[in-house]
Each structure stands twice: as structure tokens, then as C-alpha cells.
Amino acid sequence: MPSEITAAVCGVLALFCLIVSVMQFMEKGPLMNNAWIWATRKEREAMDKKLHYRQSGVVFAFLSVTFFCIALECVLLTGWLFPAAGGLSVAVIIYAFASSARDLGSGKY
């Protein structure tokens, strides 16, 4: 029973992250990016919102796939989907840091 609940919760989280990702790629809704959230009003005016929307869209897409892998593992019990989800989690962290460092270094902030 607990694995079914975990699968349902992860499925809902995967769907939520997918919706947020699509909205970010369409540049609709609130911008969910730390650089944007913590910036002052003056800094926000100079920022390239398109860049931040794309970065947030990619991160939420990664998270959606990660939660979907966890949900599938809870249902199918394959044994290899949890490590895949862990690898995706590491990949999203590396992407977030690398893209932020790249954009910061190029002066796009």
C-alpha cells in the first residue's frame, strides 16, 4: 500500500513539474528562477527573461522525468529506475550550476 501512495504522489509531482516546464518554455506565468526571485527591481529590468525561462523550463522537465521514473519504479519494481532517477537528479544539479555559471560568465545577467 505505501508504494502505491508514493507512486501516486510522485505521479502528481511529475505532472505538476511537466505543466510548469511547458509554461516556462512558453514564457507564461511567473518566472521560477532564483536569479529572478532574488534580484532587485533594477536588476530585473536589465535581465534577459527569455534565458531564465528556458533554464527553468529545462530544470522542471528534468524534475518531471525524475518523478515519473520514481513513480514507475514504485509500481513496476524493476530495480534500475531508482538509479536512473538518481542520475537524472545529479544531471539537473550539474545543468543548473553549469548554465548559471555560463550565463554569469558571459554577462547575460
Image: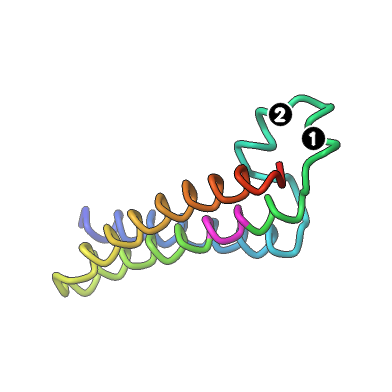
Label 1 CA crowd tier, 10 Å (few <14, some 14–19, many 20+): some
Q: Distance between the residues labelled 2 and 1?
A: 6 Å
State the extent of the magenta-drawn residues as a range: 55-60
Q: Does the magenta stretch include residue 94?
A: no
Secondary structure of the magenta portion, mostly?
helix
Q: Give the residue type that dot 1 points to.
A: Arg
Q: Which residue is drawn at 70% across and 44% down?
A: 107
Q: In this view, does 57 lie above or below 47?
A: below
* Label 2 close to label 1 by CB (< 8 Å): yes
Residue 4 as seen in the image, left or right of residue 92: left
Residue 82 place in picture, x, y as percent:
22, 63
Residue at the spot of label 2: 39
Q: Does the magenta stretch include residue 59?
A: yes
Where does the C terminus fall, quadrant-wise?
top right
Residue 46 place in picture, x, y as percent:
83, 38
Disc 2, SS: loop
The tag on residue 25 is none
**Is 14 in front, or is 2?**
14
Disc 1, SS: helix
Q: Residue at x 65, y 65 (%)?
A: 22
Residue 89 place in picture, x, y as percent:
35, 55
Q: Is residue 16 above or below residue 105?
A: below
The tag on residue 44 is 1
Residue 68 place in picture, x, y as percent:
38, 66
Residue 36 as seen in the image, left or right of residue 21: right
**Is 82 in front, or is 52?**
52
